[in-house]
Image (tube, helix red, strand yellow):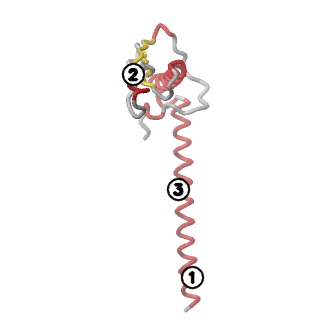
Amino acid sequence: SVPLLQAARKKNSLNLLELTEAELEEQFVRGDGPGGQATNKTNNCVVLKHIPSGIVVKCHQTRSVEKNRKIAREILQEKVDLFYKGEDSDVFKEKKASEKQKQEKKRRAKENLERKKLFKEMQQLDKQ
């Protein structure tokens, strides 16, 4: 099972719930992590809270406040959609589909490895 809020931040989700600015609480704080003085002296990290659900998103992916605001809203919209729709959400369905593809790819790689081992063993027997 996929934790619902971890499935957020997948692209191509079209049918998401709309957020209104009245439902949002926005703060600008200092970011953390690598970057030295550029990070430690500027308030370009965006903290966005959806008041009705209580979901909080922190975004510090770029140096630009405007880009961080946009990215934070996209992430929050997907998380709110997951919160209210649960497993019916497009974001959740996309995550499940990509997980299924990943598992199938692993399975095929494992089968190929087994075939290669058998082939090498057969070659060794033929040489003897």
Quadrant of the image occupied by residue 48: top left
Q: Marks 1 and 3: CB-CB under 8 Å?
A: no
**Residue placed furthest toward the front:** 37
Q: CA distance from mark 1 to mark 3?
A: 25 Å
Vertical relation: 62 (above or below) 124: above
- Position in image of residue 47 (x %, y %): 41, 19
Q: Quadrant of the N terminus?
A: top left
> Amino acid under label 1?
Met
State the residue at coordinates (38%, 29%): 32
What is the x, y in percent for residue 116?
A: 56, 72
Q: Which residue is mark 3?
A: 106
Classify residue 43 as left or right of residue 71: left
Crowd band around label 1 with a 10 angstrom C-alpha radius: few (<14), some (14–19), many (20+): few
SS at mark 3? helix
Check disc 1 and report the residue beneath it: 122
Element assignment for label 1: helix
The amino acid beneath tag 3 is Lys
Compare marks 1 and 3 and give the one earlier in the sequence: 3
Residue shown at the point (47%, 25%) measured from the top left: 79
Which label sits in the foreground, 1 or 2? 2
Q: Does 118 appear above or below 76?
A: below
The percent coordinates of residue 109 (x first, y second) are: 55, 60
Label 2 to label 3, Cα distance in Å?
A: 45 Å
Q: Which residue is mark 2?
A: 41
Give the mark nearer the N terminus: 2 vs 3. 2
Q: Secondary structure at mark 2?
A: loop
